[in-house]
Structures are given as structure tokens and as C-alpha cells.
Image (tube, rainbow, N blue to C red):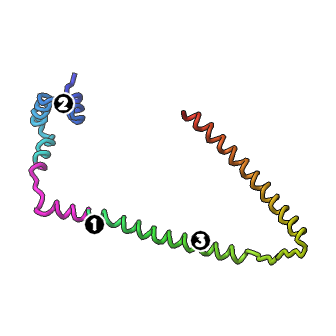
């Protein structure tokens, strides 16, 4: 059985032992067409020019700040557009509103009192309908609390 595929697989996964790596290196040194480890050694000896790291870090810092500025600029335009649309919609709605000038004037105090009672009764009825929905929401919230607990 050939040992090289298993040792190579273990080597590339970082699980080979030092003995297996040495065995692999000695075998590859004997092959004339494989200079992988020599190439790795040559690459490890290459030195970067002075100031290279600082130059890279500066360029990364510059690139990191640009998208934030663009995002802020986009949010400004979006906020201005929303504000403009809101003001335009409000002005449009106000122009569509029909102003009715229905002044109700009663000369008879009894008639005025009866009208006021009717208006208050209508208001009370609508208020009670709204409160019934509030009670059902409270019951729902109570049921949800029981379920959570």
C-alpha cells in the first residue's frame, strides 16, 4: 500500500506528525520534479520593503472611512426626501379638506339642551364601543401572560 496519499492528506489538514513530515520531505527531495518545500523556503526568506506595512495600514484606514461617509450622505438625502414628501402630503391633504361652516345656533334653550344631550349620548355610545375593544385587548394580554408563565 502506498503511504504517500495518507501522509499528504494528513499534511494538508495539519494533522501529520514530525516524523511523517520528515519522511515526506525526504521523499520529495529525492524527486527531481518536485521542489515544493524549497519554494516554500524561498518564499519565507523574502523580505518586504521598509514602510510596506504602514502603507497598507494607511490605505486600509482610508478605505474604511469612505463607506461611512457615503452612508451618512445617503441617510441625509433619504431624510430630506421623507421630510419633503411628508410636508407635501400634509399640504395636499389640507387643500383637499372641505371647510364646512355649520354654525348651530338655537334660540330656544330647551332645544339647545336636547341637542347637547343627543350629542353627548352619541359620544358616550362611541366611547363605550371603544372601551369594549380595550377590555378584550386586556383579556388577550392576560391570556398571553398566563401562556408565557
Image height check: is 109 above or below 54? below
Find residue 14 and report its image quarter: top left
In the picture shown, does residue 13 fall above or below 38? above
Indicate which label's residue lies in the foreground, 3 or 2: 3
Query: What residue would you read off at disc 1?
Result: 62
Q: CA distance from mark 3 to mark 2?
A: 67 Å
Q: Which is more N-terminal, label 2 or label 3?
A: 2
Q: Going from the N terminus, do you reach mark 1 or mark 3 first?
A: 1
Please state the horizontal and vertical placement of residue 99, each as a whole percent of the image.
Answer: 77, 77
For the residues bearing labels 1 and 2, Cβ distance under 8 angstroms: no
Residue 74 in the image: x percent, y percent? 45, 68
**Closer to the eye: label 1 or 3:** 3
> Among all residues in the image, which is located at the extreme top?
1
Q: CA distance from mark 1 to mark 3?
A: 37 Å
- The residue indicated by pointer 3 is 86
Q: Residue 16: where, in percent of width, then height?
A: 18, 30
Q: Position of residue 105 (x, y in %)?
A: 85, 76
Which of the marked residues, 1 or 2, is nearer the chain's N terminus? 2
What crowding class fits label 1: few (fewer than 14 Cα within 10 Å), some (14-19), or many (20 or more)? few
Is 58 contained in the magenta span?
A: yes
Q: Residue furthest front?
A: 109
Looking at the rendering, the stretch of residues picked out in magenta corresponds to 42-60
Judged from the image, the secondary structure of the residue bearing numbered disc 3 is helix
Residue for badge 2:
16
- The kind of secondary structure element at disc 1 is helix
Q: Quadrant of the N terminus?
A: top left
Amino acid at each position: 500500500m502506498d503511504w504517500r496519499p495518507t501522509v499528504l492528506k494528513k499534511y494538508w489538514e495539519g494533522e501529520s506528525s514530525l516524523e511523517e513530515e520528515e519522511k515526506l520531505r525526504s521523499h520529495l527531495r529525492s524527486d527531481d520534479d518536485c521542489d515544493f518545500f524549497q519554494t516554500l523556503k524561498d518564499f519565507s526568506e523574502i523580505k518586504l520593503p521598509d514602510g510596506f506595512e504602514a502603507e497598507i495600514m494607511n490605505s486600509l484606514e482610508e478605505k474604511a472611512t469612505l463607506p461611512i461617509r457615503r452612508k451618512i450622505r445617503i441617510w441625509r438625502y433619504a431624510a430630506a426626501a421623507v421630510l419633503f414628501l411628508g410636508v407635501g402630503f400634509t399640504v395636499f391633504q389640507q387643500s383637499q379638506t372641505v371647510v364646512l361652516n355649520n354654525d348651530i345656533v338655537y334660540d330656544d334653550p330647551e332645544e339647545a339642551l336636547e341637542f347637547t344631550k343627543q350629542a353627548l349620548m352619541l359620544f358616550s355610545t362611541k366611547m363605550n364601543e371603544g372601551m369594549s375593544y380595550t377590555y378584550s385587548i386586556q383579556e388577550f394580554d392576560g391570556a398571553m401572560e398566563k401562556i408565557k408563565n
